Image: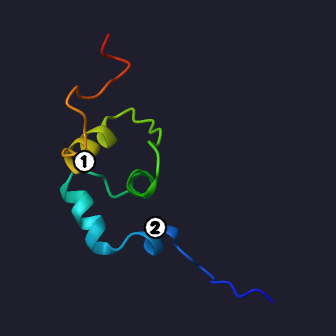
Amino acid sequence: EIPTTNNLHLIDFLVNLAQRGDWALEGLPTDPLSLQNGILVTRSSRYPLLIDPQGQALNWIKNHGAHQLPTFGTTALSSQ
């Protein structure tokens, strides 16, 4: 028999409370979808695609990874 864990919460497993608090201070909302997006951004080896109609993820990424962003800024479909 393969051992399993019942009631495993993936967000609780992958992100501790201190990191969630840091993300909240940087502007990331605390809803589960935003936390999952935060996990994807911080743990992916490539650039994740985020659909962000309210602009919350963009603001968080600007605050969280300001030292890693290129000097030419960001691109949005609405900036034509």
Q: Which residue is mark 2?
A: 11
Instruction: Single out the residue that lies furthest toward the top.
Output: 80
Q: Is residue 70 above or below residue 14?
A: above
Amino acid, disc 1: Gly
The picture places residue 26, in percent across and down from the top left corner, at 20, 53
Amino acid, disc 2: Ile
Quarter of the image for residue 72 reads top left
**Residue 65 got which mark?**
1
Number of numbered tags placed on the structure image: 2
Colour mapping used in the image: rainbow
75 or 35: which is nearer to us? 75
Q: Secondary structure at mark 1?
A: loop
Q: Secondary structure at mark 2?
A: helix
Residue at 24% x, 66% y is 21
Rendered-image quadrant of the N terminus: bottom right
| Chain-order first, disc 2 or disc 1 | 2
The picture places residue 35, in percent across and down from the top left corner, at 40, 57
Residue at 26% x, 73% y is 18
